[in-house]
Amino acid sequence: MSRYDNRSGDPTSYRDRRSDLGYGGAARSSSSRKDYDGAESPRKLDLDGLTPFEKNFYVESPEVEGMTEREVEEYRKRREITVEGRDVPKPIKSFRDIGFPEYVLQEITRAGFVEPTPIQAQGWPMALKGRDLIGIAETGSGKTLAYLLPAIVHVNAQPILSPGDGPIVLVLAPTRELAIQIQDQSTKFGASSKLKSTCIYGGVPKGPQIRDLQKGVEIVIATPGRLIDMLESHTTNLRRVTYLVLDEADRMLDMGFEPQIRKIVSQIRPDRQTLYWSATWPKEVEQLASKFLYNAYKVIIGSPDLKANHSIHQIVDIITENQKYNKLVKLLEDIMDGSRILVFMDTKKGCDQITRQLRMDGWPALSIHGDKSQAERDWVLSEFKAGKSPIMTATDVAARGLDVKDVKYVINYDFPGSLEDYVHRIGRTGRAGAKGTAYTFFTAANARFAKELISLLEEAGQKISPDLAAMGRGAPPPPSGHGGFRDRSKGYGGNRPWS
Ligand code: AMP
């Protein structure tokens, strides 16, 4: 049996390990508490009346123990891992080093993974030590398993659920799409230890979610609004939560979820383990972290500067607003071979209009945005994933978090509102080592982004067109872009294999 598995042992043994529990000692009973970076934290650890629980499971393997400081440093450098915090554990190099239970390792083998991703190599030992963790990593970096596999270990070491108990692991996510993706991975990797998980999100009937919660589930993945509904109606409670994950915290704050997050977190015991994930690290995200985290490790994957994935070929085309549609169609004619193409627009209305026009012209396009019902969004996404509708237009709701394999092209029909969003959008292609192409329409209205965009392209070794370079120097764009596409009157809907 694994060293992590406490379930079939003495059911009360977890109570005897107070020394491992990370609380109760002098440091934690001090009235002046420090948060993750040393500032005063308002998080009070009033532990009276709380049953202790186990959260430190990490045992360093001899191979990892044998790594010299220099080797550790080189490994982190090579894999672009930056760490902060006290007593940071060494990264692991192979799946065997982390000592996951056999049933988890089998799932990893079945999934065909060769080695841990950087966030897993450094994040797993940190998470298994039971400490709070800030992870700055993108979707696509393997971060979901970076918190889910330690979550499975954590659950398996807790006393089993009694009737009326809420979940042990709570994952908060900004969107329904992301929540569903997380649950897919949770189901896959938790199945062998018979863990049950459910997904709680708005826009669909509550009945099935209520039934799942009432049956008892160890892992709940939820968007904040619907979870609050479930808490207010006493369908579930958070008294058993000892492992809390906030995924894509930056996105949740962008979407205005901060009050709901605070409300939810206030109902969770203070000595929980909290894992806080974000792709970016703006001030608001940092402030919220300082409220929720205690003595956290911080791990940053990739360079702290904004960088685009180097496996993506980036093309920026300077055109006018009026040229966009024809240019899109010309582009689709060149690239369309049945592979998935994701087209980003600014507005829901724009999405609907362009999608309608594309369909009228015979292109297999569907659209996903925030005004669509959940059922329609699910359907559109499944058609896109299955390749039945290989063109999907989207607003930024699909920019983060979507994990669709084999998106070959991302087209920015409208330039996004920030360079960060640009990086996230194009990051939907070139995933898991594949090559991808991002094609961006850039108009005079986007001129203020030219300089930053050029730096980003240069860093990724991409070509800068003379027109874009001129815009970067403050010159106006060429009068009508540089056109050169077909006249639409020739028609495009013709003999396509998919029409
Ligand atoms: P995420 O960052 O969690 O959205 O993960 C992106 C994709 O990477 C998911 O489809 C995972 O199944 C996959 N993945 C996670 N860990 C690994 C790994 N160690 N090797 C290869 N793929 C992985």
Image (tube, rainbow, N blue to C red):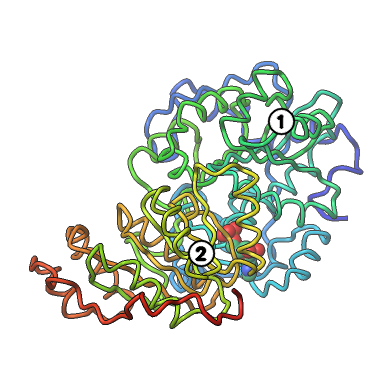
How packed mark 2 is, by other alpha carbons closer than 10 Å (few <14, some 14-19, many 20 or more), is: some
Dot label at residue 240 = none
Q: Amino acid at mark 1?
A: Lys
**Image x and y of residue 168, in percent:** 72, 35
Residue drawn at 71 percent across, 48 percent down:
57
Q: Label 2: which residue?
A: 359
- Residue nearest the observer in this picture, 392 or 89: 392
Q: Residue 225 sits in which quadrant?
A: top right
Answer whether residue 120 is visible to the viewer in this image: no
All told, the count of numbered labels is 2
- Mark 2 or mark 1, earlier in chain: 1
Position of residue 252 relative to residue 125, above or below, is above
Q: Label 1: which residue?
A: 206
Question: Which numbered disc, 2 or 1, marks the residue closer to the eye?
Answer: 2
Secondary structure state at the residue bearing disc 1: loop
* For the residues bearing labels 2 and 1, Cβ distance under 8 angstroms: no
